[in-house]
């Protein structure tokens, strides 16, 4: 929502503005929505959060996706509890958007294969690492070379996670008074918007 403030009197417009920002976040490396935060529940029931890169957005399905190593702890966490939280913050506009989503893991299927092929060589190189994410190591990890899409070993570590969001919690920070609204029923032509105390 860069340089634009949502208008809570227009629920459909507010949702459309959010979708526009997600499309730009996928394609523009410096857009505020390029990076976001993913929250899960750890296997020990403690909250876990990390920064992710927005790799794709399907507006019709209300789905965003990210790439990850199948050996990553977040995969085990999502398998145990597929409900996740997503958070974006646009500092220039002082707008925060939280979303509740259901995550689905794609591994060794058509969706994973298609997105593997579309990934850049630099992105694919991450999955050439022999050591699994979160494994204790000594020193700085070695850089892995760029790899081709036909690298079966790297592909065997590659996963795509689709997150379909159902509810948005939009917060506008302002010296004139903070505003906050919950938006749901996103499949309707005019979503339902309820203002709540910020």
Image (spheres, helix red, strand yellow):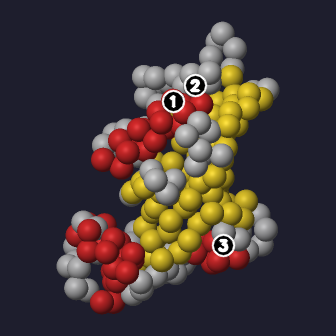
Report helix, strand or loop for mark 2. Answer: loop
Report helix, strand or loop for mark 3. Answer: helix
Rendered position, 39 above or below 117: above
For marks 1 and 3 on the same chain, the one whose residue lies earlier in the sequence: 1
View extreme (bottom): residue: 152
C-alpha span from label 1 to label 2: 5 Å
Q: In this view, does 159 lie to the left or right of 125?
A: right
In percent of the image, x 59 and y 54: which residue is there?
165
Report helix, strand or loop for mark 1. Answer: helix
Q: In which quarter of the image is the C terminus?
A: top right
Instruction: Please give the label number shown on residue 78.
Output: none
Q: Is residue 78 left or right of residue 142?
A: right
C-alpha span from label 3 to label 2: 36 Å
View extreme (front): residue: 189
* Image coords of residue 149 (percent x, y): 23, 79
In percent of the image, x 59 and y 44: which residue is there?
188
Dot 2 corresponds to which residue? 10
Rendered position, 55 above or below 123: above
- The local crowd at label 1, few if under 14, some if 14 to 19, many if 20 or more residues have their Cα within 10 Å, is some
* Eye-nearest disc, 3 or 2: 2
Assess whether mark 3 and mark 1 are in contact (beta carbons under 8 angstroms).
no
C-alpha span from label 1 to label 3: 34 Å
Assess whether mark 2 and mark 1 are in contact (beta carbons under 8 angstroms).
yes
Q: Dividing the picture into quarters, in which one does residue 155 lie?
A: bottom left
In percent of the image, x 66 and y 10: which residue is there?
176
Rendered position, 87 above or below 194: below
Dot 1 corresponds to which residue? 13
Q: Dividing the picture into quarters, in which one does residue 85 lie?
A: bottom right
Dot 3 corresponds to which residue? 77
Counting every numbered tag in the picture gives 3
For marks 3 and 2 on the same chain, the one whose residue lies earlier in the sequence: 2
In this rendering, does residue 160 appear at all? yes
């Amino acid at each position: 929502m860069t340089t634009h403030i949502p208008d809570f009197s227009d629920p459909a417009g507010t949702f459309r503005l959010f979708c526009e920002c997600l499309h730009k976040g996928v394609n523009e490396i410096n857009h505020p929505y390029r990076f976001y935060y993913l929250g899960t529940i750890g296997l020990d029931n403690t909250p876990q959060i990390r920064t992710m890169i927005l790799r794709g957005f399907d507006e019709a399905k209300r789905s965003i996706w990210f790439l990850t190593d199948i050996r990553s702890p977040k995969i085990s966490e999502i398998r145990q509890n597929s409900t996740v939280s997503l958070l974006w913050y646009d500092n220039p506009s002082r707008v925060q958007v939280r979303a509740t989503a259901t995550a689905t893991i794609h591994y060794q299927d058509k969706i994973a294969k298609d997105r593997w092929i579309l990934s850049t060589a630099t992105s694919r190189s991450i999955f050439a690492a022999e050591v699994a994410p979160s494994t204790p190591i000594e020193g700085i990890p070695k850089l892995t070379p760029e790899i081709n899409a036909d690298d079966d070993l790297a592909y065997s570590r590659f996963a795509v996670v689709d997150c379909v969001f159902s509810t948005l919690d939009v917060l506008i920070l302002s010296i004139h008074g903070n505003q906050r609204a919950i938006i749901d029923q996103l499949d309707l032509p005019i979503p339902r918007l309820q203002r709540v105390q910020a």
